[in-house]
Image (cartoon, rainbow, N blue to C red):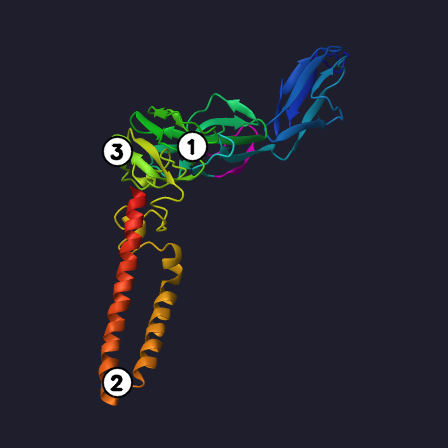
Amino acid sequence: MGCCTYEHECEVTAYYITYVAGSGGSVTKAGQNNVPPGGSISSTATANTGFVFDKWSDGKTTATRTDSNVNADATYTALFKAVAPQTYTLKYSVTPYVSGGIIGGTLIGNLNQTVTKGGDGTAVTFVPNDKNSYCEAFILEWLVNGVKDTTVTGNTRQEKNVQSNMTIEGKSGFVWTTDDTTFRYYAGANGQIKLGDGTPSTSPITLTFTKGQSCPGTLAVTAVPSSGYRFSHWNDTVKGTKDTGPLAEANPRSDIISASGGYVPNIAVTAIFVSSSGCGDGVCSAGENNSSCPIDCGNTVPQTGIFDDSRNIIITGVLFLTVGISWSYVSSLPSKAYEMFSSTSEKIKERSSAKKMIARREKLEKKIEKRNK
């Protein structure tokens, strides 16, 4: 405002335009501003975090205002209102790296987080079930909203400066944690071997793993016998004797992740097949005896033919026949002669029965030995 006296009319040289920020924000050119008569001035209102601009005290709803043709003093206050903070969700999960594979561990931490926009989430870590295994579960890659995230590797991750909802999926596989190792598998006669769901073949299977390399979690080698044969066991290929490990009779055999089975580096094993009706099948069959196949026959005579099924009936019949003939003959003898003959008859019967049984056994064993030759 200009200076004036009672005798002279006042001449206005400026007006006061005052901008004030209400709670929750700020304004430019805050405070009292001198504006010449007819002049103009502008101010912009800016909301703080958690607030939005509402309006000016004179009803204007644009955050930036321009006051033109100023001809009076005025005060304008920018008004703000609080808003609920914007939040986003973070959802974590873990799945096998290979379809149908094994996860082999657990995600530890808050798997369903709510984070304010621009804020940080909390760390989530994948922990393998067996940390002493030579083939240990590990997160091979992370997917964020279905897209591979190349910025994060390893078993732990944390989202920072969150700006959207996120679905985070860890892909778990297995990593070789020990020294370089080779597994070799061979097919013995009368059978084949196959890797996983592959095609059976007589060709050897060689699997080599280096430290830090991904290793399969469900890989196994299966012994496939030919028709008329069955799988018996795995031989140590070098020693030529039955494998002494806990997987000697396993089929399929999974050395890769069998941590509890006692890890043996650089193994070489051969699948052994035997006749499905031969020695070693648990039955003492024709052509086998306690000498040629003690595992099935032990110390017993093989149970074959008529001797197996009818020997007791035949022996009993012979005894009854002998007793009947003897009784018919001696019944007419004097008492003392009868007693003497009766005693002698019993001994004869016992000896006869024993001789017949021994003769029958020896005859059968000779036939069996002759057939084996």
User: Tag 2: residue type?
Assistant: Tyr
Q: CA distance from mark 1 to mark 3?
A: 25 Å
User: In the current view of this chain or complex, which residue is farthest to the bottom?
Assistant: 335
Q: Is residue 295 left or right of residue 217?
A: left
Q: CA distance from mark 2 to mark 3?
A: 70 Å
Q: Are marks 2 and 1 in contact (CB under 8 Å)?
A: no
* Vertical side of 353 occupied by 191: above or below: above
Residue 117 belongs to magenta span = yes
Q: Magenta stretch: give its range.
A: 110-125
Q: Quadrant of the N terminus?
A: top right
Residue named by callout 1: 219
- Of labels 1 and 3, earlier in sequence is 1
* Marking on residue 184: none
**Which element type, helix, strand or loop, lies under badge 1?**
loop
- Of labels 2 and 1, earlier in sequence is 1
* Vertical side of 58 occupied by 294: above or below: below
Residue named by callout 2: 338
